[in-house]
Amino acid sequence: MVDNRIDYYPTHEHEGIKFRRGHALPFGATMVADGVNFSIFSSTSTSCTLVLFERGAPEPYAEIPFPDEFRIGNVYCMTVFELDYERLEYGYRMDGPYNPAAGLRFNKSIILSDPYAKVIGGRDKWLAKPDWDNVYQYRSRLAFEDFDWEHDHPLETPIEDLVIYEMHVRGFTQHESSGVKNRGTFSAIKAKIPYLKELGINCVELLPIYEFDEWENSRISPTTGETLVNYWGYSTVNFFAPKAGYAATGKFGMQVDELKTLIKELHKNGIEVMLDVVFNHTAEGDQRGPTISFRGIDNKAYYMLTPEGYYFNYSGTGNTLNCNNPVVRNMVLDCLRYWASEYHIDGFRFDLAAILGRAQDGSPLSNPPLLESLAYDPVLAKCKLIAEAWDAGGLYQVGSFPAYGRWAEWNGKYRESMRKF
């Protein structure tokens, strides 16, 4: 029987590329029958163009403007047919007014990364010096959901029984004394599982593992002459994409499979995996920072802005993610659901979590919708939720963080006392 579904067929063509109006949801790039569905939100732009690259190519091979009828509400959506999934990199150009005082910072000359991209290319190896002349530094790619998890699932160890090892993926095995291959990578951690079990560890909490730029704010040390880089990763470029530079196979674009293999092996050995997630700010900084993604797509939606159009800085890093804007709130939910369902993550530790309870004007909310949504989300129902219950703006909520019977808290003062002891 031949399936003659009409949405398998193109209705438009641009420079030999065939496409049709797409599906508004889900956001991001999704493989569909014989094509890829691209969907992106922007409430204040006037137009959007999809930009397509061959992997690693210096210039795009096609730029397809979204026809007006492809915009549904504030969402641009398009299905493009007969693309080479394996070699594809994509981005967007957003057009609209440039009026910083009104919170609008559109610049059509910049190619923007997809906030929902599941893989980011262009930073494929740790400390490989970037090509600063590259027209598109952080390249959105597709992820392939063909990993064999066998019978793996989150372990659901009671939180009171956890012995948690807070771990920097690179630092844990980088020294030669670790005695492993591919030091400083996901695969190297796998080789150290017997050591973790010997310590009595049953949970590893990974410091930020999603894509960030270690060259951000890099400089030469005046005392040693070495290059100082962003080692810790608390400066997110993309919330959905694991960092290629933490994977031995990152140069082949296989960071997704390498991380999933590590998680599966840890679970086999009774060790849970938590992620340190940083939903309080991004790598775009304040008005002096780079435009990578969010700022160029919908600055007013994604960031908390002063009445003059500058960035509130409750994170201490230049900007503050506007987490209680409903669109941003949904992105955080979509992201955590993705990590829980596609990576079998057991729990999350939220960096500067007090920010997640601030209103769009910065004031603390008594019943923050994001925290409540996370507490009652059906996909995250068995995940641990741990709040670092303060922020850089002075909000300190240890003992009073809105918990809904679900949230645990970090106690920083207790931690420091234990370290001194």
Image (tube, grey):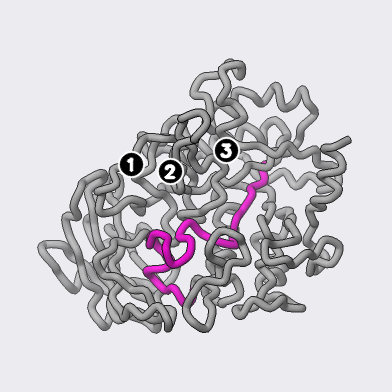
**Front residue (pair 210, 383):** 210
> Quick check: 210 above or below 288?
above
Helix, strand or loop at disc 3? loop
The location of residue 223, given as percent across then percent down, is: 52, 31
Kind of residue at badge 3: Glu
Residue position marked by numbered label 3 in the rendering: 150
Q: Which residue: 75% across, 60% down?
A: 389
Per the rendering, the mark at residue 381 is none
For this view, does 53 lie left or right of residue 329?
Answer: left
* Residue at 64% in and 78% down: 359
Q: Position of residue 108 (x, y in %)?
A: 26, 70
**What span is in magenta?**
273-301
| Residue 228 in picture, x, y percent from top left | 49, 37
Cα distance between the residues tagged 1 and 3: 38 Å
> Alpha carbon of mark 2 to alpha carbon of mark 1: how far?
8 Å
Residue extending farthest to the front is 222
Q: Which residue is most to the left?
A: 15
Q: Amino acid at mark 2?
A: Trp
Residue that mark 2 sits on: 215
The residue carrying mark 1 is 130
For marks 2 and 1 on the same chain, the one whose residue lies earlier in the sequence: 1
Look at discs 1 and 3 and give the one toward the viewer. Answer: 1
**In x, y percent, where is residue 258?**
49, 35
Which residue is found at the position 54% from the left and 35% from the top?
261
